[in-house]
Image (tube, rainbow, N blue to C red):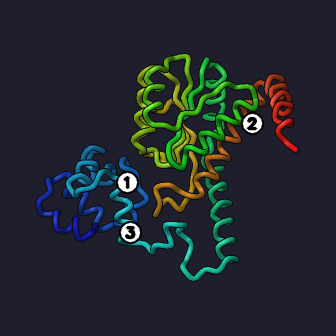
């Protein structure tokens, strides 16, 4: 990829040439950046970054990051960036658990209690709750729905991009939309969140990057932190951080309506108990 950029560099326009120069000088750094962050560093627009990627024959910025990562990191680091090929099982255990613990510590440092409170108020006031997630965020979205149902909050999870678009276009001021996107730059969830926002729904976004395109359509932002995203677009430890933010949100929702939540938990426990031996 770096060779391809060097070959094309002379034929690029002024704005895309500045992007090319930055990428060539900072390939490993670009792997961990969002579209918005790269645009800000180079004085270009998000559209110019996407156009630069397409001039290289790529589908978009995520493919550029993956191509740069392949040029600059060891293959084993796509599994987890601290791993080395010769690591034994004990070392793998230590590194993976440490990465998970670090992601939780980092996320705790950026958790905004006021944003959690606002998300609780928004969800409680809504007539309907829609939850969106694609790819590695889909299981987290499904877990969020399960936990809301357990405490008596009717929520619907949508992990199909076409249904997300339909669902989002039919929302309104009485609907709360919770979107889970690690990068904040996934086309499908960004588009659905934008449609919901434009329809007047209250949008809550759980994402790892403070400067990502999806934040433009988020009324409430809940951030996670996970460090291995320098080499991966779908972070392994991001799921741990996302689940902890979901757990925090669910606990806050339950405490805000304690009697109803505990009654719902009792009822659902009774229903589920017959499914156990």
Looking at marks 1 and 2 on the same chain, the residue that comes earlier in the sequence is marked by 1
Q: Position of residue 104 (x, y in %)?
A: 66, 54
> Can you say whether 274 is above or below 78 in the image?
above
Q: Which residue is mark 2?
A: 251
Question: Depth-wise, is mark 2 or mark 3 nearer the camera?
Answer: 3
- In the rendering, at what x and y percent does residue 172 appear? 49, 18
Q: Characterize the local packing of mark 1: few (<14), some (14-19) or many (20 or more) Cα atoms within 10 angstroms.
A: many
What separation in Å lies between label 2 and label 3 (alpha carbons)? 41 Å
Q: Callout 2: few (<14), some (14-19), or many (20+) C-alpha neighbours within 10 Å? A: some
Q: Nearer the viewer, residue 210 or 243?
A: 243
Q: Which residue is mark 1?
A: 62
Q: Position of residue 270 (x, y in %)?
A: 86, 31
Q: CA distance from mark 1 to mark 3?
A: 12 Å
Question: In the shown orientation, is residue 264 left or right of residue 101?
Answer: right
Q: What is the CA distance from the residue labelled 1 to the residue labelled 2?
A: 34 Å
Task: Say if mark 2 contacts mark 3, CB within 8 Å.
Answer: no
- Which quadrant holds the N terminus? bottom left
Q: What residue sits 63% from the left and 27% below the top?
A: 155
Residue, x 42% and y 37% (percent of image)? 190
Looking at the image, which is closer to me, 155 or 240?
155
Among the two numbered marks 2 and 3 on one chain, the one whose residue lies closer to the N terminus: 3
- Residue tagged 3: 70
Disc 1 + disc 2, Cβ < 8 Å: no
């Amino acid at each position: 990829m770096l060779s391809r950029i060097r070959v094309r560099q002379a034929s690029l326009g002024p704005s895309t040439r500045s992007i090319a120069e930055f990428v060539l000088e900072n390939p490993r750094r670009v792997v961990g950046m969002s579209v918005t962050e790269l645009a800000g560093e180079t004085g270009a627009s998000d559209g110019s970054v996407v156009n630069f990627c397409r001039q290289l024959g790529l589908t978009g910025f995520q493919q550029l990051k993956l191509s740069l990562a392949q040029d600059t990191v060891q293959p084993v680091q796509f599994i987890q960036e601290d791993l080395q090929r010769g690591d034994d099982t004990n070392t793998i255990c230590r590194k993976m658990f440490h990465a998970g613990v670090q992601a939780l510590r980092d996320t705790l440092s950026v958790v905004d209690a006021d944003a959690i409170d606002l998300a609780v108020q928004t969800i409680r006031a809504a007539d309907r709750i829609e939850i969106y997630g694609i790819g590695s965020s889909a299981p987290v979205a499904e877990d969020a729905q399960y936990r809301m149902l357990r405490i008596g909050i009717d929520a619907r999870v949508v992990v199909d991009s076409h249904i997300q678009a339909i669902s989002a276009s039919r929302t309104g001021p009485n609907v709360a939309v919770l979107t889970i996107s690690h990068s904040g730059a996934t086309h499908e969830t960004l588009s659905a969140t934008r449609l919901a926002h434009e329809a007047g729904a209250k949008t809550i976004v759980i994402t790892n990057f403070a400067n990502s395109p999806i934040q433009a359509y988020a009324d409430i932002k809940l951030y996670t932190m996970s460090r291995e995203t320098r080499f991966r677009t779908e972070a392994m430890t991001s799921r741990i951080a996302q689940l902890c933010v979901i757990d925090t949100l669910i606990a806050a929702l339950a405490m805000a309506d304690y009697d109803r939540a505990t009654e719902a938990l009792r009822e659902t426990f009774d229903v589920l108990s017959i499914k156990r031996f």
